[in-house]
Amino acid sequence: MSNQLIFIQEALDSCKPSEKKVADYILQHPDEVVNLSIQKLAEKTEVSEATIIRLSKKLKCKGFQDLKLTIAREMAVFETSTEKYQDIPDDDSIESLINNVSYNNIQSLENTLNILAPEDVEAAIQLMTKARKIAVYGIGASGFIAQDFKQKLTRIDNWCEVGLDIDAQLTISANLTKKDVAFGVSYSGQTRDIYESLKVAKDNGATIITLTKMGENPVSTLADIALYTTSLEKNIRSGATSSRIAQLNVIDILFLGITRSNQAANIEALDKTRKVVKMIK
């Protein structure tokens, strides 16, 4: 399934003002845009045709015609998502709350599935499997994602360190080498502390893997491998909800991929840690 409308939605923050005018128009009128010529869209959005072509290529399309074709394939999915999404439901019923939260999480997973590149996931798994040490960085809600990954890797006896604040992250990064991987988690991709920590790690030769929302952002620009998630959350919200579910799903994929690489030994390690914890409890 095409992912262009999801990509446009996630890439808005990284668009130039003129590109954002076109992107906003496409998101608001996708059914109209698929029938417009580039000249007509340029007229309606008051931008140059070159801007539309530049945006199309930024969205991994060959040109505007290619963008229109992929938007046409995406329209049904996009319309369903925007009609059902609510950040905080207006309906007071508990049934509405259950359905709304569950739908948002399910849709977030489905949208992420559309944009998660298998070749990038495979490359990330291979690099993490071979790494001497994996450093995982996250702050706030993303810190819980980082901690979850560390806990999983510890269970299969992989050397992993987690940094949840700038001091810890920079200290870890200062001691990384080309044999190591630094994995930065930031949904927005705008977290300055994560960016600075990954930059130090990169300067020391470590391989950089990032997990952010779709679209260009400062954190992903440092990445050797950039992994992406998406969700239906709005900029103003009560906290990370469906985005967290999408990130945890990617963490599970990476962990199981790493576990599979040396399955017998890793399953033995999982059994050993499970038994010891069970024994203590």
Image: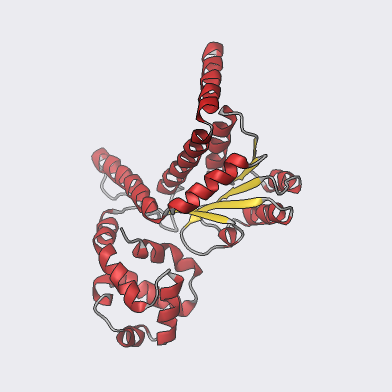
Q: How many marks?
A: 0
| In the displayed structure image, the side of residue 113 where residue 138 appears, left or right | right
- Its colouring scheme is secondary structure
| In the displayed structure image, the side of residue 155 where residue 243 appears, left or right | left
* Place of residue 3 in the rendered image (x, y in percent of width and height, measured from the top left): 35, 61
* Place of residue 81 in the rendered image (x, y in percent of width and height, measured from the top left): 29, 56
The residue depicted at 39 percent of the width and 73 percent of the height is 23
- Please, is residue 22 above or below residue 226 in the view? below
Q: Looking at the rendering, which quadrant does residue 277 occupy?
A: top right
Asked if residue 236 can be seen in this view, the reply is yes
* Place of residue 18 in the rendered image (x, y in percent of width and height, measured from the top left): 45, 80
Asked if residue 142 can be seen in this view, the reply is no
* Place of residue 92 in the rendered image (x, y in percent of width and height, measured from the top left): 27, 44
Locate the N terminus by quadrant.
Answer: bottom left
User: Residue 176 or 104: which is nearer the viewer?
Assistant: 176
User: Residue 210 or 237: which is nearer the viewer?
Assistant: 210
| In the displayed structure image, the side of residue 40 where residue 174 appears, left or right | right
The residue depicted at 25 percent of the width and 47 percent of the height is 91
Q: Looking at the rendering, which quadrant does residue 114 occupy?
A: bottom left
- Please, is residue 26 above or below residue 128 in the view? below
| In the displayed structure image, the side of residue 41 where residue 20 appears, left or right | right
